[in-house]
Image (cartoon, rainbow, N blue to C red):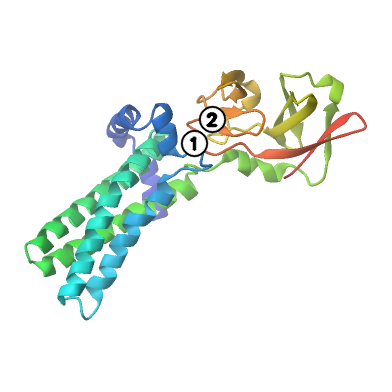
Amino acid sequence: MATLLARLEAAHPLDRIADALRRAALATAGRGRLGALLHGVGFGHPLHPAVVQFPVGAWMSTAVLDALPGRDTPGSRRAAATLLAAGTAGALPATVTGLADYATLSRQQRRVALVHVAANLTALGCFAASIVARARGDHRRGRALSFAGLGAAGAGAYLGGHLAYAQDAGVSHAAAALPLVPHGWHRIDAVYAIEEGRVFSYTVGATPVVVYRDRDHGTDRFSAFVARCAHRSGPLAEGHMVDVDGEACLQCPWHGSVFRLSDGRAMHGPASSDQTMLRTRVRDGQLEVARP
């Protein structure tokens, strides 16, 4: 399987279709506030992995009923058909949130994601055909189609797991940099050297950190977070400040993700995860930071 997945990741002939699907995803579910919402901006992580639980759970429950000895009783048939229809209907939000995620993927990730999409579309076709067969009274064929659909959905889920865990799709790169910050408190700079309303860059251990100073009801407030963009480890220290709804934010120079400087919250994608914050304190006129 590792060899097959490596070949799939390097399958350049898929790029033409994968890129076309990305353009379609951007046009339908990947832009603006709706695209950000579907991708999970504001929720702290992508929505797609959570949304898919409903259709997959319904389809698996259908398979359980189809495998039980009493599967041919009217009650069992109705229950299986109801679960099958509910799961197939629930695939719509799963598909839409998946398209929003697809629009943020790199080219290598999109090759795997394209086959993931194809497997899930095959599963949907099998489940839809199963619904039709059951409605016509051909329950044996309906069960066979459901099992085939579940197998295709399982293959799609396997590829989805590869995307998430082997290719870090949707993973927060900022969180991955946090363990490189040594334990304990670390001096950053003299407080007077950190001007209000500006972003300053430092390194703590092997981790780049950005620091921002503002005032809250007349009191100095410092915020510090990992300067590797949660989306693709972009160098946030090289980004520029922007205003979003009256809030000072920092925009990643690579893909345009925007984070609120006061608390690291993702305001605009493609990042859906917030930036990992560090604790701050002032001791003897020096700003210090530590792991959360």
Name the outermost residue toward the bottom: 69
Q: Is residue 211 left or right of residue 27?
A: right
Q: Which labelled disc corresponds to residue 138?
A: none
Local packing at callout 2 (Cα closer than 10 Å; few below 14, some 14-19, many 20+) is many
Which is more N-terminal, label 1 or label 2?
1
Element carrying mark 2: strand
Quarter of the N terminus within the rendering? bottom left
Where residue 29 sits, quadrant-wise, is top left
**x, y (%) of residue 143?**
17, 67
Which residue is pictured at 27% across the width and 33% down the height?
Answer: 17
Residue 275 location (% of width, % of height): 61, 36
Amino acid under disc 1? Val
Tell me if label 2 and label 1 are in contact, CB under 8 Å. yes
In percent of width and height, residue 67 lies at 24, 74
* Residue lying farthest to the front in this orientation: 217
Q: Residue at 68% across / 34% down in the picture?
A: 225
Mark 1 highlights which residue? 41
Q: Quadrant of residue 203?
A: top right
Q: What is the number of the mark on residue 267?
A: 2
Q: In which quadrant will I find the C terminus?
A: top right
The answer to which of 133 and 34 lies nearer the viewer is 34
**Disc 2 from disc 1: Cα separation:** 7 Å
Q: Nearer the viewer, residue 95 or 239?
A: 95
* Total numbered labels: 2
Residue 47 appears in which quarter of the rendering?
Answer: top left
In the picture, measured across the screen, residue 241 lies left or right of residue 66, that is right
Q: Residues within 10 Å of mark 1 (few under 14, many from 20)?
A: many
Q: Is residue 77 visible?
A: yes
**Kind of residue at disc 2:** Met
Relative side of 180 to 6, left or right? right
